[in-house]
Image: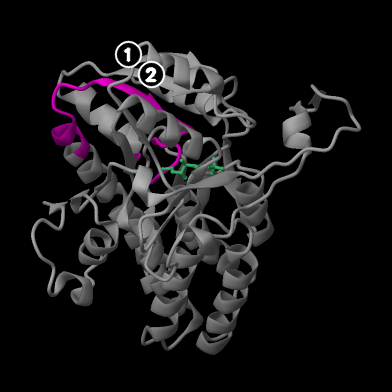
Amino acid sequence: MNTLAAVEAAASTTTAVAGVRWDDGLVIVDQRRLPTDVIERRLTTVDDVADAIRTLAVRGAPAIGIAGAYGISVGLRESPPGDADTARDEIRSIEQRLAVVRPTAVNLAASLARVRSAAVAAPAASAADVAAAALAEAVRIHDEDRQATLAIGRNGAALLADRHRILTHCNTGRLATGGDGTALAVIYALEAQGRRPQVLATESRPLLQGARLTAWELEQAGIDVRLIVDSAAGAAMAAGLVDAVILGCDRVAANGDTANKIGTYQLAVLARHHGVPFYVAGPLSTFDPATPNGAAIVVEERDASEVTGFRGQQTAPATVRAWNPAFDVTPAELITAFITERGILEPPFDRSIAEALGGAAAAAGAQGRVGVAR
Ligand code: MRU
């Protein structure tokens, strides 16, 4: 067995429902078909991977990072390079093709860059050595995310004390990450501890990640979940039905401004108005110190047809124009805390984020509580 074959054998997993996994190749659950059909698809070309990410067959910031990372191995199998240098060139070209497919979540470009630099730096005599280094790095990214989600769950469950009525948005669970999820990992941890969380899941228009995916995932896990239309969130808070809002993130800027599924910002405003804590859960791989603030985040705009219809069924006049940003940016000042694998990050976020990311400059001279609880 050569090095590549050994890495491939070790990489393969047989996890049941996972949004993305490596099983002698890249396999995803096609999230476009949920909740009615649970269909796994094997992605065998870079175009397949790009198409799956673009169309949200695989989605969620960590999951697209993992899919992109494995996508490099998919590309090296699709067009096997003849020698190590050609393999490195091929990796750079696959990275460029995949990194641009969805711009907002930092995980996609960051994971691709990580795999590329690990493979380029690896001492490699052959194309197979380079491919082995690339796949090994993708597996590391996947494993790290799996571990991070478990720690996020533990840290969030400890933070919540007796607050167990949670409003969440979009889908942040096993489908969206390499493990239990981000916000949903907290809910799974509460359930595992016998604390019986009660979840209000927003539909998350227009693509219904909450209705199709979160409601399905939580029901599968036997968790108490009720679906609400996005516009019922204010009424739910006003009625005292929400102890905390917990949701995920696609890119957290250095100052704590956070891009997440469209509708997050208005939930943050509502939570502030009603005195409900507003928590953002995410792995540090979704924090981007190179993005100084929310104004620097590129928000993906998607096709108007996602707003004017659903699965080919027209729901608005065919001629009406629509604006369809996939994400919005919540200012840091509306966020109570971040739940990460390194602990709970509290304001001032520029300092607590830098410290959690290992920023020595921010940690030096910090006075009082920096809010990184481990
Ligand atoms: O467009 P999507 O479905 O990929 O958007 C996903 C989200 O906004 C999630 O909240 C975010 O990626 C966190 S998932 C752990």
Res. 335 in view: yes
Residue 310, which numbered label? none
Q: Nearer the viewer, residue 40 or 262?
A: 262
Q: Quadrant of the N terminus?
A: bottom left
Residue 167 painted magenta: yes
Residue 115: quadrant of the picture = bottom left
Q: Which residue is located at x 39 percent, y 33 percent? A: 16
Q: Dots 1 and 2: beta carbons under 8 Å?
A: yes
Magenta extent: 156-182
Residue behind mark 2: 237
Looking at the image, which residue is at 42% across and 67% down? 292
At which x and y percent is residue 160? 18, 30
Residue projecting furthest to the left: 368
Residue name at image x 31 percent, y 57 percent? 284
Given residues 348 and 181, the one toward you in this image is 348
Q: Residue at x 44, y 47 (%)?
A: 21
Residue topped by disc 1: 240
Residue type at mark 2: give it: Met
Left of 15 or right of it: where is 342?
A: left
Magenta stretch prevailing secondary structure: loop
Is residue 225 shown in magenta?
no
